[in-house]
Amino acid sequence: MATSPRRWAGVLGLVLAACGAPAEQPPPDAAPPIDTPPPPPDGDLDGVADADDCAPGDDTRWRTLSLFAEVDNDGVGAGGPSLQCIGATLPPMTSQLGTDCAAGDPARWRLLPYGFGDGDGATIVATGSACSGATLPPPYRTTAAGLDCDDDDPNLTRWVLTYPDLDGDGVGAAPRSIQCLGASLPPGRRLGGYDEDDADPAVITTEDSDDDELDLILLD
């Protein structure tokens, strides 16, 4: 008896199903597959490879920093640095900064420049740097307040051009001199120096306007 074509088609289908369909072939221009290497060992699972971890068996520490001792809680350390293996935060009493100019004083931690000194309420010109906190400590200033002639004496704060008044008529005469004074003039000294006869209180000439600016030079 002859076998029908339909029967042969069914047998062929069973054979193909049993053997499986042929594997899909990649296109001829496809890149070859890349073998991904395994990740480096991380024994403590802190996200840092053991080779780069300063404490490969401790997941709370993984990096090394150069730190300074910080003893006065101002955020700035001092002294020599030391290498420490730490985690996300700095250990207590340490700082990455080592420039504290007063390691035992929390109110001072940095050097600030100054241009004037003030020991009595009026400044003298003085330059340098002072160990400071947020601002310069007294007696240092960055701006002038007067032109002090004696910063050690609060009663002497300015240079003044004066004339002697020998006859007490309120007007002086030459010779003039520059004196270190305070708020008031000393006895027998005047700002004006246009008295033609300083031995006679009755003789006072009119002030010379041309010499007025010289007579009233106050270096304060």
Image: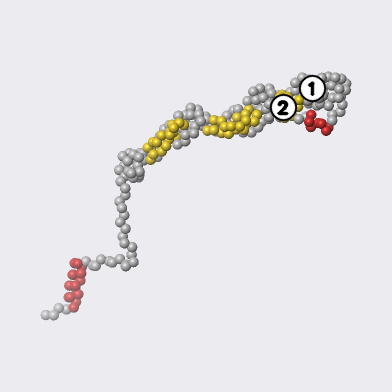
**Can residue 75 be seen in this snapshot?**
no
Of residues 67 and 58, the one nearer the viewer is: 67
Q: At 68% from the left edge and 22% from the top edge, which residue is drawn?
A: 155
Q: Secondary structure at mark 2?
A: strand
Is 82 left or right of 120, judged from the image as shown? left
Of residues 163 and 141, the one nearer the viewer is: 163
How has the structure been colored for display?
secondary structure
Q: Amino acid at mark 1?
A: Pro
Viewport quadrant of the N terminus: bottom left
Q: At 63% from the left edge and 25% from the top edge, which residue is drawn?
A: 119
Is 84 left or right of 132, judged from the image as shown? left
The residue carrying mark 2 is: 159
The residue carrying mark 1 is: 164
Q: At 87% from the left edge and 26% from the top edge, which residue is drawn?
A: 205
Location of residue 65 in the rendering, given as x and y in whole percent from the top left corner: 41, 38
Q: Amino acid at mark 2?
A: Trp
Is 71 left or right of 157, judged from the image as shown? left
Q: What is the residue that sits farthest to the bottom in this orientation?
A: 2
